[in-house]
Amino acid sequence: MQKYSVFSLIKNAFSNHQNWEVAWKDPTPKSEYDVVIIGGGGHGLATAYYLAKEHNIRNVAIIEKGWIGGGNVGRNTTIIRSNFMYDANARFNEFGMDLWRNLSQELNFNVMFSPRGIINLAHSDAQMNAYARRGNSMRLNGIDAKLLDRDGVKKLIPMADFSDEVRFPIFGGLMQPSAGTARHDAVAWGYARQADDMGVDIIQHCEVTGFDVVNGKIKGIRTSRGDIKAKKVGLCVAGSTNILAEKLNMTLPIETHVLQACVSEPVKPLLDGVVTFGAGHFYISQSDKGEMVMGGDLDGYNSYAQRGNLPTIQHVLTGGLALFPFLSRLKMLRTWGGIMDMSMDGSPIIDKTHIEGLYLNCGWCYGGFKSTPVSGWTFAHTIAQDQVHELNSELRLNRFSTGHLLDEKGLGTKTWIG
Amino acid sequence: MLYIKCPYCGLRAQKEFSYGGDATVKRPNINEEVSSEDWDNFVYMRKSPRGKHIELWQHIAGCRQWIKVQRDTATHEIFQTAKVTEEIR
C-alpha cells in the first residue's frame, strides 16, 4: 500500500494527482468467510481492522447496504469525549481516548483529532453539585475534569450571554480539556483503507436479507448479492439493528429514533471546543471550515427516516439563541438526520448472543462516534475470543434482566425524553 | 411537521402533542404472578418496526387525552388515530 506522506503528496503533484492508488478495492463477495461484519460504518470498519491487526483474522468481509461512511459515521457532530460518571462507561471510553490520540499515526490517515475540550454548562446550584460529583468520579478513573465557576466559563466563551436578563444564567460548568473533535469521514476512510490492505473485503451496495441459523448456530447470511457462509457474524448496524433482529426472531431493548443536526455558514474562528447548554437541548462546536455545528435532541418518536421535522430544529435553535445570541445573525447551511439505536438505559451493548457465532454491537444512542475505535477494538476481541473483554464486561445484553443497568443520565426507558 | 387528528379535537399540529411510545406493549396483569421474563419484556423489550407502528400520543396542549396513532416510521405518514380505549386493526 502506498504510504501517505508529504513526499507522496509532492510526488503525485507532478502527475496532477491522477495516479493515486485506490484507497480500498471493490471486491465481489466470496462464498465463505471466517467472520462477516454487517454494517460498513465506523464501528464495523474499526472491528474489521482490529480483527485483522490484533487477532490476525483476515478472512473477513464487511457487508454494507449503502456505501461506507454514508450512515451515522458521516452524520454525527464529531464529538469525542469520555466525561462519564459510571466506572464501566468511563473506563471503556477513556481506553478509547487513548486509541484516538494515536489514530492518525496508526492509520496513516489524518483524522484531524483535535482535543480542544468540552464544557457542560450548569445553570443552577444543584447542577453545579451534580457536575462536581461527576468530575470527581471522572478523576477517580484517571480522566481529566475541571469544575469551572462563572468567571472561568466567561474566560473561555465570552460570547455567551452573561447578561442579567437571561432566563438560565450560567453558574459554571464541567470541562474535560482532553475531549475534542475529529473529522468523521476520515475515520471511516482511514479504517477502511487499512482493513482493505490487510485483506478485508469491503462489500458495498449489498443488503442482508436473512440469516442461516441451524441448531442455534450461525452458518451464514443471505444477501442481495448471494448467500455467504460465515463461521462468525457480527452486527454493527446502529439504527438498523431492530430490522435485522426481527429477521433473527430477536427482540432487543432498543428503539430506533431520528436525531437531527445542522450547520451554519462558515465564520472566522470564534468558538474553541465544544459547549453544551445545560438548561435545554443544545450543543455547539465550530468546525475547521468555520461552520457552527449544532445539535440537540431526538425528534421524539420512533423513526427510520434519515430526516426529521422542523419543529425540533426550531426548538434546538431556540435554546442555542438563549445561550449564544450571535447565532441569530448566521444563516443555516443545512440540516440532516440520522437514525439512532436508542438503548433502554442509554449505554451500548457489545456482547455475544444466544445464537452461537452471532455477536451484537448496538445501543449507541447518540454517542456512537466517540467510541468508534474502542467499540471496534472490544467487539473484535469479543468475536475473535468468543468472550467479552474486561472493558465491555458490563456492556452486556443481560444487564436489563439482571438489573445492572448503566443509566448514566438517570432517565429510565423513555429514550425519547432525552 | 406531523399533523395528528385527535379523536376529540380534530386535526392539530405535532407541537400540541407529546409522545408516549409503543401502544402495543401490554402491562402484565396486576393481580397475577409475573415472571421476570414477562416483566423484562414489558419494561425493556421493543419491536420498533420499520413501517406501520401503533403508538401513544398525549394531546398535552389540547384536551390532554391519551390517543392511539398508527404511523409509518419510515415515511411518517399517519394512517389512523383512535381513542386509547379503541382498537386499531
Image (spheres, rainbow, N blue to C red):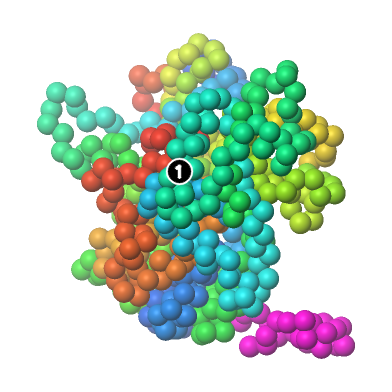
- The residue lying at 21 percent from left, 39 percent from top is B38
Q: Is residue A318 magenta?
A: no
Examine the residues drawn in magenta and state their main secondary structure: loop
Mark 1: amino acid: Asn
Residue A138 rendering spot, x and y as whole percentages: 46, 48
Whether residue A154 is visible to the viewer of this picture, yes or no, is yes
Say left or right for A113 vs A83.
right
- Write down the quadrant of residue A353 in the picture: bottom left
Query: Which stretch did the figure color magenta?
Result: A1-28
Query: Would you name the residue on which mark 1 appears?
Result: A136
- The residue lying at 64 percent from left, 57 percent from top is A115
Pick the residue in front: A200 or A51. A51
Residue A280 rendering spot, x and y as whole percentages: 60, 30
Pick the residue in front: A49 or A153. A153
Whether residue A317 is visible to the viewer of this picture, yes or no, is no
- Write down the quadrant of residue A361 in the picture: bottom left
- Write down the quadrant of residue B37 in the picture: top left
Residue A51 rendering spot, x and y as whole percentages: 43, 76
Instruction: Quarter of the image for the N terminus of chain A: give it.
Output: bottom right
Q: Is residue A52 above or below residue A328?
A: below
Q: Is residue A19 magenta?
A: yes
Q: Is residue A50 above or below residue A248?
A: below
Say left or right for B10 vs A271.
left
Mark 1 belongs to chain: A
Mark 1 residue crowding within 10 angstroms, few (<14) / some (14–19) / many (20+): some
Residue B47 rendering spot, x and y as whole percentages: 37, 44
Q: Is residue A311 above or below residue B72?
A: above
Say left or right for A58 vs A283.
left
- The residue lying at 56 percent from left, 25 percent from top is A124
Pick the residue in front: A379 or A408. A408
